[in-house]
Structure formats: structure tokens, C-alpha cells
Image (tube, rainbow, N blue to C red):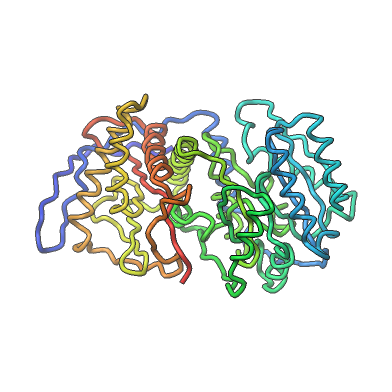
Amino acid sequence: MIEARENITLAEPVIQTKPIDTPLALGPIASDGFIDDLKTTLRRSSILALTQPEPHREIIKEYHPGATVLIPIHTDQRIPSIEHTLKSLSNQGEKTRHLSIVIADNGISNGGRSHIESFARENGLIHLTFADARPTCPEHKNPAHARNKALELIRQLATQYPEYRQDGILILDSDTVLSPGAVEELEKTYRQHKGTVAVTTRNITVPDIDPKTQATYFKEVDSSSQQRLLPKLYEQGKHVDVASIVAFGGDVATKTCGLFVDRETINRLSKPFVVMPNGSSEDMLLAVALNNMGEVWHNPKAVVLDQARENPEQTKKQRRNWGRDHTILFADLVSMGLASKGVHVLEPRGRLWTEWKVPNSDPITGLIINPNQLKDLAIKLKEDMLHEPNQNELQEGLEILERIIRHIDLTRNHAPTAVKLRPELPEPIEPNPTQTRFSPEALTGLLAGNILGMHDIQKIYKGIAPRIVFFGVRQAGKWK
């Protein structure tokens, strides 16, 4: 819980040629604080356990080749796609015989279970079992709960059966496929670097995962790509790098799908997946935990094709939920002292990303990612929200965003604080509107979610600055 601060009046900035020392002009600061409940307290307890795990213990790597593969599935409608997932596991060559599989059943039928078991056996996958992850309350209807239940079972199986004791646990979704040789590539990177606790794949969103699509995309994979060490996201006693996690996701963090993680490392985390209110962000928090326990590497030669099932409206709804959770997560980190005070800006300048702090903004804690892009998205969101049930809340949030960006534009070239270059982040490129996750619908959905999340965590009054401001949508990027 953040203590209430004294209300202060912040004057409008004026254009001047010398450094600007006027406070951020948003009016007096609201003193209501966070809206708390028992669920929030429990969630923050889980987040604290992930952000401050036992760091950098020596990693002992015995040779148990292959992986235990964890796949959640929540409906019989996904059975045709999980067949493709299992088929791709049977196409891993010599490594296939070193794979065991745990399906996290989050709602399929008994007939569905039997069908999956038969299909796996027919394709040479003989070590397969089911973890009962069926929801017992509304909060359990999400993959985070299913993955935690599956990990509990994997730990139990490993104590009894040698075939479930591989060094690695590989996490996939029920609508994904691995490229041939992906498991070998992941394991190779894992063994090549002594301090590695996890290896990520290259994830490509595709319209389907049928054999024809697989042949097309796997043929186009650049086999010359090099593995790279992913940047640090958090060091104990310092701040979580929320900007990098939100803006670049799987490019700099551990995207859950396709993650190869050291068994002993993940066993040190009792519940590595935190259930957020709107069903997302569990991979962001796992990224922070793993980053604090060792090295996380990326191997682009190991590819996962991820089926995009969403139409534009579904995309918008899903991204809204994600954007909402991103804001709530940011507020949780603020409450634990793990987010930097003041309003921080992450934006591209030329071929690099830069980060800087808005002068005299300490009474507010905030993060603004790519303000120029947010200007365009704000215009589109205004056009889209004419028939929104949350129109008033969205309008209030857009007014706050516009005033912050106006102040950013006035102070950008006069900021007395140092501009920090971020060369470890992927190079800025223009978002691709043909890609579902970077479409205007997806990005405006994220922005709308950010605003609704701000309303979730605090009371907002017209003309008064909230304690927390967060506007951060997903960026497209490429490695240098």
C-alpha cells in the first residue's frame, strides 16, 4: 500500500530555451491510493516471491537429455491443433525418444483425453500423462493455473519415474508446433553456457499450423542466426525493467510458449506462474525470476509456429485484457518499491532506444513507451470508442495521456537528467499492420487496457493527476 502524499498544485509548463524546471502539469495529485483487496494482497505476495528468489546458486547440470514437455489445453476444440503440436514433437529425430509429455487438462472431456493419448502413442510418444488442472473457481480458467498444476505433477513424477527426470522442461501451447531439430538446438544452448537457466525460441505467428504452412515457414527460417544472451531485467535491490518487458516481450524476456527451462531452477519457484486479474502477464513475471537466478539465452534456430486464431475484434479484446494487466502489474511493482519514481519515457531516437526521466515528475510514478506512437493510437482510440461502454473512463485516460505527452514534447530536449541509451534492445522498426499482434486493433486494444487498468488500481478525478500513469504498447523490433 502506498502512503498518501500531500496534494500539490502543478502549473502548466511554458516553452523556453533554458532547462525546464516546472513540475509535470497535471493538477493536484489524488490522495486515495490503491484500491486493495485480499486477491491483490495474495497476488503481490506471489510477485514478491518471483522478483526476489534465491539468486545465482551454482547450476549443476547432470546429463539427462531431452525434456519434459508441458502443454495446457482447455477445450476439445483445440484437439485438432494439439495433434499438430504432438506430431512436431515426434519429428525431433533422436531427441524424440528422450521426450516425456504432461498435458495440463484445463477443461477437455474424457473422450478428448483418450483421443490425445491414442494419437500420441501412434506417433511414438509413449511417455504421456495428464495433470488435472480443471478450474475450481473462476480465477483458475487460465493457462497460468494450468501450468502451475502441471509443474506440481512433473515434480511428483520425477521422484518415481526416470523418464520424467530430464534436465529441461519445455513449455508449449496447444496451438503451436516446433521446427525439426528445435529440441536439440535448445538443449545445445543450455549445455553450452554453464550459467544458463533458460533458453527461448524464435516465435512466429502464422495463420494456421497445418503441414503446408509449416513447410512454408520452416523453409524460410534463417539458419545463420546466432544465439544471444538476453538483457538483465532485474537485479535484487534495484528496479524491475518494466519498459523492456512490456515493449518487447519475448524479444528480451522469456515468452512462455517455447521456453526451455532448467528443471532445478524452476523447482526453486513454488508457483512460477502468477494469475493476473485479466489472464495475462504470467510470462513477464517468470522472466524476471529466471533473470535473477542465472542467464537466459535466445536461440533463433529453434522455432515455434504459433497459430493466430483471432479476428480483429477478438484481437482487440485480448490485447485490452493484456494492457489492463500490464498496468495492474506496474502498480503492484510500485507498491513493492520495484518501479522507479517519476515518469520515465522509453522512445526511439534514430536506430537506438533511449530512456529518460521527465523533470520534476517524482510525485507521480509512471512509464510512457514511445509517446509519438501513442499520439497516433490515441486518435484511433477516440474514433473507436464512440459506442464503448467504458467511454467516460477511456476519455479521462486519454486526457491524462495528452497532457503528459504535451509536457514530454516541451521538456524532451531540456531534460536535466541524463538520457540513457538502450543498445541491448531490438532496433526500432515500423510496426507491421499485416501482423495480428502489431495491427491497429491490437495496439489500440492495449492502450485502452492501460487506461482501464489505471481505473482499476486508483480513483481518478478530472483534472487531478493519478498516482500511477502507465501507457505502454507492444513494439516491433529487430536484433542488430
The N terminus sits in image quarter: top left
In the picture, measured across the screen, residue 449 lies left or right of residue 22, that is: right
Q: Residue 259, image x and y in percent?
A: 65, 56
Picture residue at 14% right of the left edge, 44% below the top: 11
Q: Residue furthest front?
A: 212
In the image shown, does 323 or 223 lie closer to the viewer? 223
In the image shown, does 303 or 295 lie closer to the viewer? 303
In the picture, measured across the screen, residue 105 lies left or right of residue 346, that is: right
Q: Is residue 262 among what the camera can see?
A: yes
In the picture, measured across the screen, residue 31 lies left or right of residue 196, that is: left
Residue 97 lies in quadrant: bottom right
Q: Is residue 49 among what the camera can see?
A: no
Q: In this picture, is 383 found above or below 16?
A: above
Residue 294 lies in quadrant: bottom right
Q: Residue 73, image x and y in percent?
A: 70, 39
In the picture, measured across the screen, residue 381 lies left or right of residue 313, that is: left
Q: Residue 293, image x and y in percent?
A: 62, 60
Q: Residue 443, image x and y in percent?
A: 40, 45
Residue 215 lies in quadrant: bottom right
Picture residue at 58% right of the left edge, 70% below the top: 222
Picture residue at 46% right of the left edge, 46% below the top: 333
In the image shown, does 322 or 30 lie closer to the viewer? 322
Label tally: 0
In the image shown, does 271 or 95 lie closer to the viewer? 95
Picture residue at 71% right of the left edge, 59% below the top: 262
Q: In this picture, is 78 found above or below 342?
A: above
